Amino acid sequence: MNRERFLRACVATATFLAFPLTRAAKALTRLRDGKGFVVKVGQDRSNQPMALFEGDTFWSKISTIDTAGDLYVFESRRVKEGGPSHHYHFEQDEWWYVLEGEFQFKIGDTLTHATAGDSVFGPRMIPHSFAKVGQGAGRLLMIFQPAGRMEECFRQISQGVTRNMSEAEQDHFRETHGFKRIGPPIGLSKRMVDK
């Protein structure tokens, strides 16, 4: 094959491959309505805040369906001390921004203390957990990217789906929603201060 034919074949192949990608990008854009929106303070995107645990409320701010699964953003208000089990997500990065109160985070083997204005990043496949510590309410802005099935998971927990499950059934539930529990929550007796 001479050089000119080779270059024409490359251009034709690139054009052929780009066409489906362009169609896919346009289809993804169509899933978003092209309009922005506002979710006021104390409101939930779908007007259905979730209560996951006693004294723990989630308000979705950007729903999974708003971004075709690219992003999920919610605010969490926690009254009681504590937090979730130590776990990792198969495909989601997780980011926390402390709006109010004090929290302890464990990312991998590193413990840190965070207060209002601090942010913490937990990469996918790295074990992490957090706990609200101290007096008063704590509030976090939390992001999952990509969204995965986390919003669906939280909604089902809020609806009581996991209430009577055994630990093995809860572990299976977690894994079908894209994450794995690998240890207990952060022990509240192990409070620490940044160095």
Image (cartoon, helix red, strand yellow):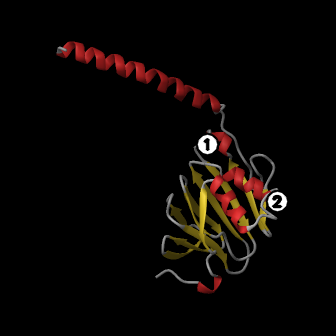
Is residue 177 shown above or below 180?
above
Residue 184 lies left or right of residue 47; in this view the side is: left
Which residue is depicted at the point 55% across and 68% down?
128
How much space separates mark 1 and mark 2, taking CA atoms?
Answer: 24 Å
Which residue is depicted at the point 66% across and 38% down?
36
Do we see residue 42 in this rendering?
Answer: no
Which residue is depicted at the point 71% across and 80% down?
135
Q: Position of residue 127 (x, y in %)?
A: 53, 66
Is residue 161 shown above or below 65?
below
Q: Quadrant of residue 50?
A: bottom right
Q: Quadrant of residue 181?
A: bottom right
* Camera-side mark, 1 or 2: 2
Is residue 182 shown above or below 134?
above
Taking the view exactly as shown, the residue that stands out farthest to the bottom is 189
Residue named by callout 1? 69
Q: Position of residue 87 (x, y in %)?
A: 58, 66
Neighbour tally class for label 1: few under 14, some 14-19, many 20 plus, Cα within 10 Å:
some
Q: Please name whichever residue, 92 or 139, is drawn nearer the observer in this view of the structure.
A: 92
Residue named by callout 2? 160
Q: Position of residue 96 (x, y in %)?
A: 58, 62
Is residue 179 shown above or below 18?
below
Q: In the rendered structure, which amino acid carries the disc numbered 2? A: Gly
Which residue is depicted at the point 34% across and 16% down?
12
Query: Dot 1: what SS?
Result: loop
Neighbour tally class for label 2: few under 14, some 14-19, many 20 plus, Cα within 10 Å:
some
Query: Dot 2: what SS?
Result: loop
- The tag on residue 190 is none
Q: In the rendered structure, which amino acid carries the disc numbered 1? A: Gly
Q: Please name whichever residue, 173 or 122, is drawn nearer the observer in this view of the structure.
A: 173
Residue 179 lies left or right of residue 170; in this view the side is: left
Q: Please name whichever residue, 50 or 4, is drawn nearer the observer in this view of the structure.
A: 4
Location of the N terminus by quadrant is top left
